[in-house]
Image: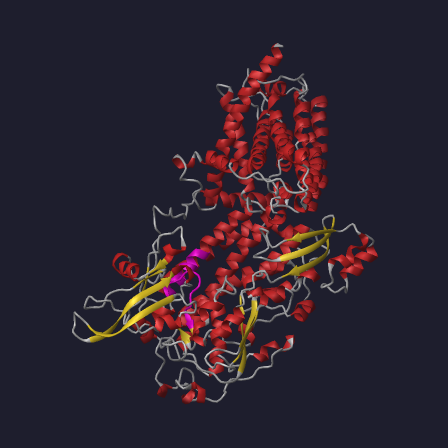
Amino acid sequence: MSHLYDALRAMRTTLVTAFRKPTTVEFPAVIRPRGERYRVSFALPDDEHGELACIGCIACERICPSQVIKMRSTGKIESPVTGKKRQYVDEFVLDLSACIGCELCIQVCNSDAIRMTREPEEPSYSREGLVLDLVRLRANARDKTLSWGRGTELLERQEPPKAEKGGGRGGRPAAGRPDDSNKEAPAKAAVAPPAPAPAAAPAAVAEVK
Amino acid sequence: MSVQTQSAIRAGVDPHLAPASVEADGDLMLLHFGPQHPSTHGVFRMDLLLDGELVIKATPYVGYLHRAVEKLCEKLTYVQQTPIVDKNDYVSPMTNEQALNMAFEKLLNIEVPRRARWMRTIFAELQRIASHLLWLGTFTLDLGGALGGGTTLFMHCFRERESILDLFEDVSGARFHYNTHTIGGNRHDIPAGWDAKVQRALATIESRLHEYEDLSLGNSIFVARTKGVGVLTGDLALELGITGPNLRASGIDHDLRRDAPYGAYDELTVRPCVASEGDCLARARVRMDEVRESIRLVRAGLDGLPEGPICGFKPIRQATQVKVTSGQVYVAIETPRGELGTFVVGGGDTPTSPHRIKLRSPSLHALSAIPYIVPGYTVSDAVAILGSLDPIMGEVDR
Amino acid sequence: MNALLHGAVYGAVIVTVLLTMVALAIWGERKLAGRMQSRLGPTLVGPVGLLQPIADVLKLLQKEDIVPLGADRWLFGAAPVLAVLFSLGAAAVVPFSPTSIAADLDVGVLYVLAIGGLTVIPTFVAGWASNNKFALLGGMRAIAQSVSYGVPLVLATMVPVILAGTMSVSGIVGWQAAHHWLVVWPFFLGLPAFFVFFLALLAESNRIPFDIPEAESELVAGVTTEYSGAKFTLFYLGEYLHTLVGSAVAAALFFGGWDGPFAPGLHWMVAKTLVLFVSVYWVRWSLLRFRSDQLMELCWKRLTPLGVGLLLAAAAWVELGPGGAR
């Protein structure tokens, strides 16, 4: 009998949910509202002078874990707009089909030259359709909405606290911040026993915050 | 199949023996619960030796999803690794990132600012809710069929999970693989108005939990399918290294958040949920209680979230900015599946990449219980047991 | 000769109507299931997705027809056809209106039970002929389940037979039209008997909570694992037909068939069948499935004694009580 009672209760729940408004968003007629920071494709916008912002510093190419960015920079050329010498890129290719969407390229760009977009690319029948070249990337900057993420802003917000503050809670030495030349830093990592006994497992994890 | 043969097979025979050696009786059927199956939670194979419907021996085979993540991590530099380990336990990426970055922070002796620690905790607890909701949906799918009551609950759980993924999208820009943790803290800060959205999402989830229980844990058919099925004793669990809800459901009160606190857990009190029967119903009950506990922890986290910087180390500007010449650390955190540990050996040929990263995945240990707890039950129960252990093959095989 | 022609014509009409109803039922079920799951169901094909079943059938028919190596080709091909035939066959004796019935057999109830019992054969044949362990397991479970649940099905069906005094389905409907629907009076016999019949119907048609033979999460697709293309379409169709015809039989035996408070006719029969059909799907989309042994326990320890009790009570009612209006 408990089966019957619970079955009826389950059926009552489905009856209640049957009359709720469905949560379906009928794509592609309706696009669900995407967040401000939603990131899905790429764009190379112009800077405030109207030229391509990318100075070809190859930081994004080097940071990409999947190595999807390939570019060729020119040397320093005099800019036709501002008259100052700056570098440009001849060729910039981003293979979107291999991109894992990690945003590291946006993170390292000091010139805010590469941005992600909030609208995806059109699906394509061939791999070449998902390879974004310079023309498509500049077109994306015009046609698609850019995502919030910007290299300079991310880098600024992630700046660590000043050394004299000594970190959050008391008791930690103020000189705990390693600097760039980490190869001189002594091996300060704690060595934990590799196979903690099951009953004593809590002791193995020390005070990492 | 004589009783003596049966018990000889079940008790004490090495599960790694080839099935052929048990064929002597000849009337056992070998069923490959193959890598292609709607309910194996990813690509996983279980060889079942059946006597009719009764499972005499179960042998798990893993490795179908091996993607050489640890090898890849040896080639990438320290700052490039977070997006890669995102994809291990692909159902709760926040905890993967947290585990890895905590290990690097310990290796480099970096202190993480308080705001970042609290943010990481809030994200981890929200991820726990999302992961357990997904687990509940897939578990009832296993029990109730893809064309039936299981699907109804599955759809509902995913709808609530979507609200949590929307919250993560507001913070990091990605719904699923965020890359929002970094060495020293977080990369994205919480936008304005996020608190209110979180409270709304939590209120909706809390109000619908009783609906889920009507369709699952409170349902006598569910109880009949899971009560007394797949009993995992506390001793066996400890011996196999099983952690997380599977361990707590077997009566052992061990939770890394309380016993070895990290993040903000030293300031937030975590009340681990424990059950004592060790069957599938106990595991389900523990996970549902954990959802409620996590809702409470997220609210407490939001209340106490301090202001301040979100990263304690220099931000990522180049791939080679972190160099480590020597040292090894092991850091473990409590993910929705149990203890996820990261063992990092620094140094080696290239100081910019780790020499070796070893990830201790809780799901692998959970799956190692299969040869012990599946025999003696039927095929339907084997599916229920596998579902209740909550394995994610991405982290089992890495 | 007249009866043969009559049967052929009405049979063709009923089969056509049933197949159309199945198409509508596929659409209806998907919409209903969608709404219960907070989603919309089919919307793109045709207005409100009404042409979705046609799209489904066309898609299934153009798929490659794979016969596994080592499968018994004749049995493999015969099983889906038999499944549809047996499901349709039971509709021959159901009166859809006071005048339309394909074959007015005196032993209509016996015929329905017999044909209904035969539907386990294509299921098992599919399981055996597929040369696949999952299908075999599904087939074995199907036999156990169908044979077991045949007992409460027969016992529950005997209650209307005893109360109405005839084995002809149209006779039972006529008796209900003259007296009361059996679920109305005597409700203490009619309602429990209907309840047992409903559960046995769910089990015979392999519907959740009794769908162990085709339990997707355990047995991939159960007996239909190796089927693709046209043969799978026939199985799919056969499932819906079995449920639909079973609902029609239940409507005729317990709810008075074409009878209604006003204007009795085909529309009442259709309405009752659809209500029962929707209930079957409502149950399906709300509940989880039983394990084989729990299923068997429910049948033998609960439904069968209840059925025997109802049978005896109905007999007592007719012989000793006021129900003896013969």
Q: Is residue B220 visible?
A: no
What residue lies at 68% left-to-right and 31% top-to-bottom? C117
Q: In the drawing, does residue B217 fall left or right of residue A81?
A: right
Where B172 sits versus C305, above or below? below
Where B103 sits versus B10, above or below? below
Q: Which residues are magenta?
A: B161-181
Q: Which quadrant: the N terminus of chain C?
A: top right
> Which of the two residues, C27 or B398, is positioned nearer the viewer here?
B398
Q: Is residue C137 visible?
A: yes
**Is residue B174 shown in magenta?**
yes
> Which of the two residues, C183 or B283, is positioned nearer the viewer here?
B283
Q: Position of residue B96 (x, y in %)?
A: 50, 69
Q: In the drawing, does residue B32 fall left or right of residue B268?
A: right
Q: In the drawing, does residue B385 fall left or right of residue A138?
A: right
Where B202 sits versus C256, above or below? below
What residue lies at 27% left-to-right and 58% top-to-bottom? A139
Q: Position of residue B336 (x, y in %)?
A: 53, 65
What residue lies at 77% left-to-right and 63% top-to-bottom? B11
Q: Which quadrant: the C terminus of chain C?
A: top right
Q: In the drawing, does residue B237 fall left or right of residue A178?
A: right
